[in-house]
Amino acid sequence: LDPNLRSDWPAQHFLQFRFASCQETLMMILGSLCAVLHGSAQPLMLLVFGMLTDTFIEYDIELQELLDPRKECVNNTIQWKNRSEADWLDSNKTDEMRNVTCGLLDIEYEMTNFAYYYVAIGLAVFLLGYFQISLWVKSAARQVKIIRKMYFRKANSIISDINKINDAIADQVGIFIQRFTTFVCGFAIGFVKGWKLTLVITAASPLIGIGAALMALFVAKLTGRELLAYAEAGGVADEVLTSIRTVAAFGGQQKEVERYDRNLIWAQRWGIRKGLIMGFFTGFMWLVIFLCYSLAFWYGSSLVVDAHEYTPGTLLQVFFGVLIAAMNLGQASSCLEAFAAGRGAATIIFETIDREPEIDCLSEAGYRLDKVKGDIEFHNITFRYPSRPDVVILDQLSVAVKSGETTAFVGPSGAGKSTAVQLIQRFYDPNEGMVTLDGHDIRGLNIQWLRSLIGIVEQEPVLFATTIAENIRYGRPGVTMDDIIDATKEANAYNFIMDLPQKFDTLVGEGGGQMSGGQKQRIAISRALVRNPRILLLDMATSALDNESEAVVQDALDKVRMGRTTISIAHRLSTIKNADVIVGFEHGRAVERGRHDELLERQGVYFTLVTLQSQGDKALNQSRFLRGHCRKASIRRRTRSQLSNLIPDSLSVQSAYVEEEQVEECIEPAPVTRILKFNAPEWPYMLFGTVGAAINGGVNPMYSLLFSQILATFSIPDPEVQRKEIDGICVFFVLVGVISFMTQMLQGYAFSKSGELLTRRLRRMGFQAMLGQEVGWFDDHRNSPGALTTRLATDASQVQGATGSQIGMIVNSITNIGVAIIISFYFSWKLSLVIMCFLPFLALSGGFQAKMLTGFAKQDKEAMEAAGQISSEALNNIRTIAGLGKEQSFVEMFETHLEAPYRAAKKKANVYGACYGFSQCIVFLANSASYRFGGYLVSQEGLHFSLVFRVISAIVTSGTALGRASSYTPDYAKAKISAARFFQLLDRVPKISVYSNKGDTWSDFRGNLQFVDCKFTYPTRPDIQVLNGLNVSVKPGQTLAFVGSSGCGKSTSIQLLERFYDPDQGSLVIDGHESTQVNVAFLRSKIGIVSQEPVLFDCSIGDNIKYGDNQRDVSMSDVVSASKKAQLHDFVMTLPEKYDTNVGSQGSQLSRGQKQRIAIARAIIRDPKILLLDEATSALDTESEKTVQEALDKAREGRTCIVIAHRLSTIQNADIIAVMSRGFVIEQGRHDQLMALKGAYYKLVTTGAPIS
């Protein structure tokens, strides 16, 4: 395909078969042939059916004639016994009678023949169905396997879109061809056998199409409206859950639940309308179908009886031909969606497969140098990342790195140091300029060979989930155990490995999770060394380690640098001092180079970095330790816990998902009785709905009753009586249609009403339960705001699948089968028993066909998991793999893992084909047996032939309907699980309950606080001790300031005071009461909090300030006085809408200083006894800081206050300053006392560095 053609039609359908070999093409052609033959089977059966009907009717007419005592059978024609009587009868009557033969029809013999036809067609259908499906599925499996391989080579990932292609080239194609053939053949039979009737029916049938189209349109529109309405409620939920700490601190739970509930009303209204409209259109379609029946039989019978154009059999052939054709056309169209989705996916995927990567890792091109010295030079390099083309990362960079020397790159973060290293590895090519190795442009060198020269050790080394030895082997294939041992000795890793129980066969866990940072780092160094690289790249190789490990790793690195070209990127000076050359980076340029002491004299970039650091260094080994280790750890761990659902920490995501799956799995589905209890107030609706459903269930069997009645009329000898009967039945059809219309609407409306009310009730209760959980619960990544909002949205609406509509479905099926069985046993119990044998199979077949519509690709997903794991490991660590030149081995591993799903798919193709064939042929077999037995009953026991049709059609139609209904149960199972999840939430007893009235309250709250030996770890990160025996106390009215580096537990202590968490050991005493004994709502009502990034809600300024006190109705004058205290009033008065100005979502319409002052006003309005200021001014510029600081100083008067700050100016006049480190206080006292001590605080103040 040339590219310009491609753009015209995105991917014409056959593009999806690009990778089909001759064998697959042959399989697909044979499969299509089978599908065409299979499609023609149903219309073929109609021909047999027509003949069979005619035979029965002829036989019945003969019987009726012979019932007349004046007639007898002579020479196989019916004659009058007494000729004279015939003279005064009209002569043409006699002619007509002469045609009636007798005695020739052996009904049993005829029926046996028809039974054989049926069996033959049935067996043919079984084989054709089997081949049609299995050939298509097998060929698709092979093609998809090829597509996956090709795609993985290019993109190293798997995407779900490939499953869409699978759907579009597998069984769905065969089924589409089959249905389309049926459509064509059905109409062909109609037009050939009786074009008049066909035209009449066809004229009426667009009504059904229009009904279906309108229904789809309206439902889509209303669903859209409902989703929009729910989106607003969801927005509220999301806003509230995101700022749960603020809501908890200000006690706004009840208020939020009300606000959420108000937004649910609209969603409920649209949902009910949707139910009503669906009921209306379903009813409308049934009405049209029954009117069609009525019209067709009325017009058809006049053609049979009056015009003698058709036999009754022809009438049936035409009518059912058109009906089957229309139905199959409708079902075929559902396959088109799969094709469209597949086409879209194919376009994207094939584009990736066809894309020539700019840097092809797997190519053999490029030359290899015989001897490598190791000189690297950057010539005027300009580079931008392809994903951020507007940001220049490297700007005219020129640096030479001499072989055998150690060159250190230093500079602030974002200066382009790591980028330069990535260019050496050719992860990217520069936009301008070139990188040379020994004078050769590296773009001309073979990429795998180039990467094999380079060993790299990164800040966060990536290990693969296998043994230590295997991880080191990744460095160089075919390396001996001795080499591995040598490498580990050089990297100072040998000793710790030998101490492990399994030594080199120890598994490192997902992403190296079982190892400490230092151990991972040393394994990574061994992996780099085992390659015996000419060039060693160290990217912040020790920054993530604590002092001890750092010394060991640094030692290892110093050993291995000898005689290699080494580039080291580092922030810690200790690691750089002894480099041969230091290059200072700034804004993507190399601004200076030289040795340590030369650069210090120049007082440039390097000098500033050094001075900043050494101040810290001198201050305290401890504070240096804090800066390095404590901070790194806390930041790393924090991001991990909060972002573990976004950012793969190598593979923590995978394991997290696995855990989540397991948690979800073990939920017991909720008992239906409990779900119904929640729905109890709606019992009248459910009652009406059930009545409607019961009547609807009876409609199907009614149809078979009327249909057989029509056939019976064709054998009535007297035309007058015949006409009257037929008209009566047609009126009946119309009547049934009208009733069906009414009851469908009733059922639709009643159940949607009860369901939507239930959904709203559950959402409200769920939301309330969520807001009542303790704050620690929200730290779990499974309870992130996104996950919770989704749960409210989906789980609640799925639960209604277990009540209303499900009850409707069950009642419908039961009455359907019940009425059918009563009818059939009433009219002929013998025949009914024979057909009942087929009932289970019929139900199975119906269920299977309903499942067919959804396609079977879902089960392949499990089989793909293993391959998926490899691809995600490859994708997350793509740099490491590329750096080690290991793409090929990953591709091979991936391909071996594709074998299993492929074999499974082939096996499944057979099973699935057989099931499909069986489900299609069972109806034919059931018919063959029952009509044959029916013939026997008619001839031997004088059963009227119309009853044979009545019994058979009643049971066969309701049997398949039963199967279809049973296939809707997945919704039911889902609903029970959703409900169980919901009940889990409702039943969960929070560790710290907001809604309970238990706990101490007292009237003279003074705000006397004591932390006594508090120890605490966050529930989500139990391995990190945050508070480690915190002892500090504040008297009423005093101000306590916490200072210390981030991660030392300052904010945590505030959260304990708010009772977001309770301490693990030790206690927090408030006015002599232990915090765990105090009533939560009471305690929080006494505390006001202003935090670094204040959370505002999407409403007016006035409402945001009022939020400060949710226990009373706050008057406007209170708001004004609070905002005056917060230095906010003057600014608000300048706004056009004053206090009614909307602050935007998250307060986005305001500046930080303004938001901060609103937050202060909000805290003041509660008139709290304790004021918490968490870095309240750190995010502001100097001017706003002054204003806010003044406001805060005013607010502090007469209250107990705890301040956390980094800027010393904000702390100097505190009553107590506590310097924290690693979760406990190392010094405390007033500003001047601490200065006199000349300890940690003094160092911080004099160096002027921010305390972090």
Image: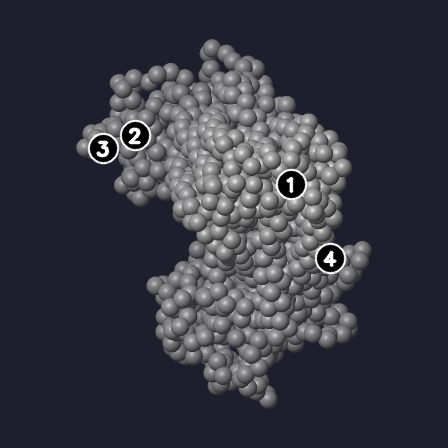
Q: Mark 4 points at which residue?
A: 507
| Mark 3 vs 1, N-terminal side | 1
Residue positioned most to the front = 84
Front position among marks 3 and 1: 1
Front position among marks 2 and 4: 2
Q: Is residue 603 visible?
A: no
Q: Name the residue under label 2.
A: 1100
The Cα atoms of the two marked residues, 1 and 4, are separated by 99 Å
The Cα atoms of the two marked residues, 2 and 1, are separated by 100 Å
Q: Quadrant of the N terminus?
A: bottom left
Front position among marks 2 and 1: 1
Q: Which residue is drawn at 51% across and 70% down?
A: 353
Rendering coords of residue 565 (x, y %): 56, 77
Q: Which residue is drawn at 47% across and 10% down?
A: 1003
Q: Name the residue under label 1.
A: 79
Q: Residue at x 55, y 86 (%)?
A: 367
* Viewer-nearest residue: 381 or 444: 444
Residue 801 location, quadrant: top right
Q: Mark 3 points at which residue?
A: 1131
Rendering coords of residue 1114 (x, y %): 33, 18
The Cα atoms of the two marked residues, 4 and 3, are separated by 63 Å
| Mark 1 vs 4, N-terminal side | 1
The Cα atoms of the two marked residues, 3 and 1, are separated by 114 Å
Mark 4 is on which residue type?
Leu
CB under 8 Å between callouts 2 and 4?
A: no
Residue 484 location, quadrant: bottom right
Q: How many marks?
A: 4
